Amino acid sequence: MHIPGLLSALLAACATPDDGDSVSFDVPTSPGDAAPDDRGLPGGHSQADEAESTGGRTPDPGAEPGPWAEGAHATADTGFDDAAVFPVEARSSSRTSSLDAGPTRWTVTASGATIALTNAAAVFPDGSVLYMAGGKVKLRRPSGTTETVANSGSNGVAITGGPQFGVAYQSPSGFSVAWRGTNGTWTSTSLGYTTGGGSATPAGCVDSSGNGTLALVNSTLSDPEGKLVLFPITGGVVGRAVTYTGDDEATSPSVVCSDTVADEVVWRHQLSGTADIWHATVDAGRITGAAMVLEGAYDPSYAPGRWVGYHVGDSQTYLARSTNQGASFAAARHLAANSKFVTVRTSGPVIAALYSTWPTTAQANNPTANQSTRVSRLQVSLDGGVSWTSRDPFGSAGGYGPCSLSVSASAVTGACRASDGIAGFSYGIR
């Protein structure tokens, strides 16, 4: 939800965050603080490895492709358009919209606070943000107040969609799911499942009836890749784990749920220093039709409309799209050089991609050592991918990331880890 600057300031004065986390707001920045539209952004880590090999094919770093140009690393697209199945894929809108020049910004000051990695969601459609601080899983509401989801937990992600807020997280006893009741009370249920000790971050979603999929990777501390594990969700109840045995080197799953078609999952397959992105449909936790769809590609973020964000081995970021029900994906937009970690979200014709950039490719290839120069960039299309607008949510300041994103018909909202807590922003759509 987009909150105008005056109202946000009044709410900030009345907010009563719990557990000592400090919440503050900024008024919207002036148009002069925003990045100009439609410009090429100079170029951002594997979520499993801080440094990765350059195994991807090499795109032209000087190119600024049109919104439907194919990249060399993408598999061929047949051109069949399935917009009737996923209406979000419509490439134009009958309404003329514009994105605010400057954002409303806010911060949660909490030492050591973290946010979910980019393949999973941490921002709900209403703008609420999930984060971890002080060993707890917490939620910041758009009003500026905070809630405690779980008193002990890590790797918390939002289960997006559905009639109520849902969160999946790693508790001391294994993975758990928490749902928020209409009275604001959180109720947690243990899934009775533990991984081999790795920092497996789950990814989950449900449709409007509360049916969906939760995915994670059974990894170890010494080997961040492992088998993909999926849990069916029926009416908000999480079922038994189903392990996909077809890939022992999976990581970074990202899922999409729909009222009309089967759930879908993409993940990164890592082998011998190179990575590919795989896609499959999911039925009651069981994978069907698994196939490699993007070569030399890392850390996918998947969104309705079959849009996927990713980076390649030489630190270039892209958006790709499938128009044939996920059988293949083709590069739809080159985002930036010297960049990594795309998170993409969609809502109707609105498509937003948030990603990290560094001054040089060498810095992008070693993101942990260069966190201070990590800059968050945003590109948004309001017409289904025909035209794009660029924004810099925190200006040219470094030190922001990882990040997460959500979109609605009225706002694009994001949140990033910062040096002193969590920093968020919202751009209104007019």
Image (cartoon, helix red, strand yellow):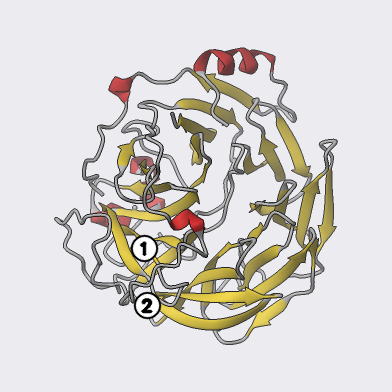
Q: Name, please, the residue furthest toward the left.
A: 62
Q: Position of residue 354 (x, y in %)?
A: 41, 46
User: Could you say which quadrant of the image residue 231 lies in?
Assistant: bottom right
Q: Nearer the viewer, residue 254 or 192?
A: 254
What residue would you read off at disc 2? 273
Residue under label 1: 320
Residue 14: percent from left, percent from top = 69, 14
Which amino acid is tagged 1?
A: Ala
Side of 421 relative to 177 (left or right)? left
On the picture, is 320 further left or further right than 9? left
Q: Within 10 angstroms of label 1, few (less than 14), some, or many (20 or more) residues?
A: many
- Whether residue 368 is visible, yes or no, is yes
Give the left or right position of residue 231, taking residue 124 as reference. Answer: right
Residue 395 has which mark? none
Q: Are marks 1 and 2 in contact (CB under 8 Å)?
A: no
Q: Residue at x 83, y 43 (%)?
A: 181
At horizontal 48% and vertical 50% (from top left) the residue drawn is: 346
Q: What element carries label 1?
A: strand
- SS at badge 2: loop
Work out which quarter of the rendered image holds the C terminus and state it: top left
In the picture, the quarter occupied by the N terminus is top right
